[in-house]
Amino acid sequence: MRTLQLTKVTRDEAEVLRQIAIATFVDTYGHANTPQNMEEYLRDNFNIERLRKELQKKDIHYYFARQGKDILGYLKLNCGQSQTEIKARSGLEIERIYVLSENKGKGIGRRFCDEALRLASVLGKSYVWLGVWEKNPKAIVFYEKYGFRAFDEHVFILGDEEQVDIMMKVDIDE
């Protein structure tokens, strides 16, 4: 079996990122939301112009999980003012961890979490935080295994629907 590698996504790979982002988001949440709300969210959040701009920002880090030439999933991390909620310099946000359905259960999510914690340590951050949908118990349990603990909630807007995300964080040992 080929080794799993994490590589930074380049601006030239924006279209590939867009395709994987849409596929994984629909696979994860499509069954629980209306087609109209999904379409609006996908259009607003995964359009090529937005992704290209994000790929140029120094405080946003996208990674692909690759095995040979195959891309299995992606990770998005935010620092500083690029964080979606908490804008503290001492934090790093995991905004997205998504794995294509046929690659789930292969340890890719663990590698992404390990990378987030490693990067937070390298950047001198004191904690990593994220928001996870309250109706995604598998993800909540996954993050708890990494030491993440709930500390608040926030509203996540998907189309015309308000959903509740549990905000979780873990302190970085220095």
Image (spheres, helix red, strand yellow):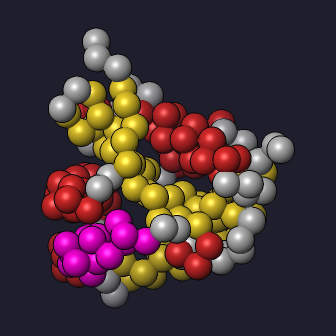
Instruction: Residue 84 in the image: state x and y as whole percent.
Output: 54, 76
Can see residue 83? yes
Instruction: Residue 103 in the image: state x and y as whole percent.
Output: 29, 32
> In this picture, is 132 found above or below 49?
above
Can see residue 131? no
Say which of 57 and 24 sits in front. Answer: 57
Left or right of 137? Residue 158 is: left
- Look at 48% across and 53% down and name the residue there: 136
Say which of 73 and 156 sits in front. Answer: 73
Question: Which quarter of the rendered picture does the N terminus lie within?
Answer: top left
Residue 160: in magenta span:
no
- Which quadrant of the view contains residue 123? bottom right
> In this picture, is 25 found above or below 82?
above
Say which of 75 and 142 sits in front. Answer: 75
- Which quadrant of the view contains residue 99? top left
Instruction: Residue 73 in the image: state x and y as whole percent.
Output: 31, 43
> In this picture, is 67 found above or below 9?
above
Left or right of 130? Residue 121 is: right
- Look at 73% across and 57% down and name the residue there: 125
Question: Which quarter of the rendered picture does the C terminus lie within?
Answer: top right
Q: Residue furthest top?
A: 1
> In this picture, is 122 found above or below 82?
above
Magenta stretch: give its range: 41-57
SS assignment for the magenta stretch, majority: helix
